[in-house]
Amino acid sequence: MSEYPGSASPLPGFQAREPVLLALVATHRNTGLEILARLRAGPTHLASSVDAAARAAIRGTVVLATCNRFEIYCEVASAQDTDAVFSALAAHIREHSGPLPSDVLPSFVRHTGPAVAEHLFAVAAGLDSAVAGEREIAGQVRRALIQAQAAGTACGTLVRLFQAASRTAKDICARTDLGGAGRSIIAVAIERAISGSRHADLSAASAVVMGTGAYAGCTIAALKARRCSNISVYSRSGRAEEFAAARGARALTRADLPAAIGGADVVVGCSGAGPRIDAAALEEFRAGAPRRLAIIDLALDHDFDPDVRTLPEVELITLDSVRLAAPREEAEQFMLASDMVRQAARCFEEQQKLRAVDAAVVALRGYIQQVLALEMSRVRDRHGCTATAEEVQFALRRMVRQLLHVPSVRARELAAAGRQDQYIEALEVLFGLSLQPVADESSDPHLPGFPETSAQTG
């Protein structure tokens, strides 16, 4: 057997099978809002019944759960393990979300590899939201990572992925006007409301805003831009007082709401939390009210039943109808932001490749250092002269640096070109190295499961 380290002496520091990212995505587009509510409401810890091999293949998880989406991000040991992990996650979802329709799990969109970064970056920037460019999702992405870190489930790769997503969202906000898209949607809705009313502006109008989220804040700003000063805010979650005070509006209690709606010219629903107001209730609120009422329902899980449009002197303006009338210039901003997302995703993947090659270079350096140590041991054994050994050691170290310079440079060049596998294979073939997988230093080797999450609703 050779005295030099090789296949008989596996070297740590390198992952022989490169891990991959996996994302399972359910949103308002492919899954009903009721199902999403059940998904995010259930516990998110892996059950003990999950297949042990699949669980061992999961190196980290982050769960992004909001009122409009439920997404699970994982780092998986290798591409060969993704099917087993998907099955384990599907079993977990079935167990903890109660009875689900048979078509729910197949409707989950499955992203792997580079597509995961591009999807998450688009989500964080608001490109995948119901209203393009909305800002609230960026904070939800940050909180999802914080919760996963607190639970000990966020491995190093996922930490870097989510941090890069947050940076991309900030860059898009700074370099484009996409963040104004949400405000534009609301402005278009209010313009439609005014066009059918007796008001040239809203200076003499009364408005009620339902909700305290990002859309509600934009709505109040848009109403004030139309000179509306009589604005009331209602929140089922009890946050109306502080929210309204900060924006110069009046907070409503549950008891105040019927009379406020009955006397309003414009009602804007931005909440989507709780039971809808149906036609019978609205008719009771408006008993004896002669004025026309424009209802703008911007909530995905609507605040008003569609039947309210059948009432006399009531116009219902929905998010879908408003989007069709949104300013065309938003499309250019969306395209610019999409280009930035793709560029940022490519950059993230290049950094991941460089990290993989760096590990290979570390393995190569370790191999040569072991050879050097063996040679120096021989020098000491043969000569026993410290001075001579130091001189030889200096010469050999210089030789090692010279030998490693070109392979190290080539490693990075090949990684940038997407050919890192060729470099790794060459190391294994030429040096007979047995490169063993190791856990990321920032990951927890004992994955406890998914972090607890909660929806951020207004």
Image (cartoon, rainbow, N blue to C red):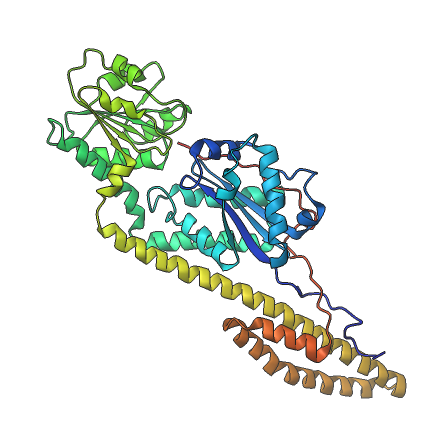
Identify the residue at horizontal 64%, vertical 71% (top origin): 360
* 197 lies left or right of 144: left
> Where does the N terminus fall, quadrant-wise?
bottom right
Residue 176 at least partly seen: no
> Where does the C terminus fall, quadrant-wise?
top left
* 257 lies left or right of 440: left
Identify the residue at horizontal 59%, vertical 53% (top origin): 75
Along the viewing direction, whichever of 57 and 357 lies nearer the viewer:
57
Percent position of residue 306, x then y:
29, 26
* 109 lies left or right of 90: left
Percent position of residue 423, x then y:
61, 75
Please, is residue 258 above or below residue 446 in the view? above
Percent position of residue 311, x then y:
22, 19
Please, is residue 418 above or below residue 113 in the view? below
Residue 127 at least partly seen: yes
- In terms of image quadrants, where is residue 91? top right
